[in-house]
Image (tube, rainbow, N blue to C red):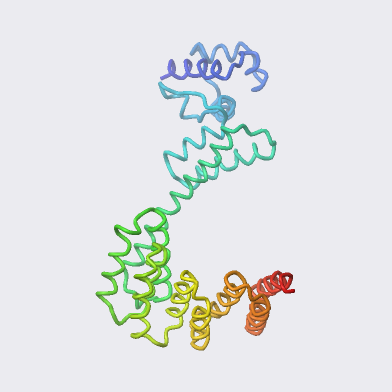
Amino acid sequence: MSNVFAENLRKLRLSKKLTQEQVAEHLGVTVQTVSRWECGNALPDVLRLPEIAKLYCVTVDDFYKSNSIAYANYAERLLSVYEKTGLPEDFLAAEIEFQKMIKLENMTMRDMYNYANLNDQMYINSQRKALDWYDKILARDHTEDPLSYYKALDFKIRISHESGDGYEKLIPYLKKRVERDRNNPNEWQSLCEGLYYCERYEELDETLREAIKLFPNNGTLYIQLASVHEHYGRYDEAIKCYENAEKLDTEKHNEIFCKAVSYDIYMGEYEKSYNTWLELAKLYKNEGLDVDAEMAMREAEAVKTKIR
């Protein structure tokens, strides 16, 4: 093992195009000491190993491997560690190294790619972890906490669709859930959410109309139907759906938010959008939701600039 260690010290130093003198100066030791390490006649102090590893852009474990290679920099090496483990602490270690490089503003295109790849890997790993926990929730009885249960289902729908399971697995799964519990409006809402993500608008339109017949007092279904109307350019019908939902007010003013956006983005009726944002800001303010009220006021001011 000591021969592998000594050979790696020499090989990694050469791969970084460093002389023994440069290494000695960096570590604050003599050239003779570096030479003894590489000849296998002595070993560095264990507390010095992380410093040497960082200089050669490897980890301490790499010194003991027979096929160790030096990476372009230490951040790249830590990225490779995270790719293998997926552990949060390994992501954080690599993130810290990349942030140092970003501050120095000396990143190569390869460094930029590696940093993007690090975050891409973290995104994938986080999605997998989220799906695992959503599935744990969905394995339990929804009556325990309906709000958390169906939020978990909705987020599972989004992630499943983004991962490419929308057409082959997601919709059949949601339809089976509705068949098992047809009298549960939450199951219908989730099916409609899945159809929306998969852009199956005709089927979504039919499903929503069937669901609204079963649950005429469900405001969320009207908001979902409004999105279908907007897709087909039936904006007046969308506004009627938002107003129906507003009367039922089951979405904490989400229907008013959507109506303000629809007036602005789809219909170009900026004055109506402006007044709707003001109405929403007032509602939020009265309920003590100051941050939401400020958001609504910012949107109102933005739309106001479009009014002629």
Most foreground residue, 9 or 137: 137
Image position of 229 (left or right of 168): right
Residue 15 x/y as whole percent: 54, 18
Reply above or below: 257 against 194: below
Most foreground residue, 177 or 83: 177
Most foreground residue, 12 or 300: 300
For the N terminus, which image quadrant? top left
Task: Determine the residue positioned at 67% across, 81% down.
Answer: 275
Image position of 76 (left or right of 128): right
Residue 145 x/y as whole percent: 39, 76
Reply above or below: 283 against 303: below
Residue 117 x/y as whole percent: 51, 41
Residue 142 x/y as whole percent: 34, 75
Q: Quadrant of residue 224?
A: bottom left
Question: How many callouts does the rendering have?
Answer: 0
Task: Determine the residue positioned at 42% across, 41% down.
Answer: 85
Reply above or below: 283 against 164: below
Q: Quadrant of residue 137?
A: bottom left
Most foreground residue, 35 or 240: 240
Task: Determine the residue positioned at 44% across, 72% down.
Answer: 228
Image position of 280 (left or right of 166): right
For the C terminus, which image quadrant? bottom right
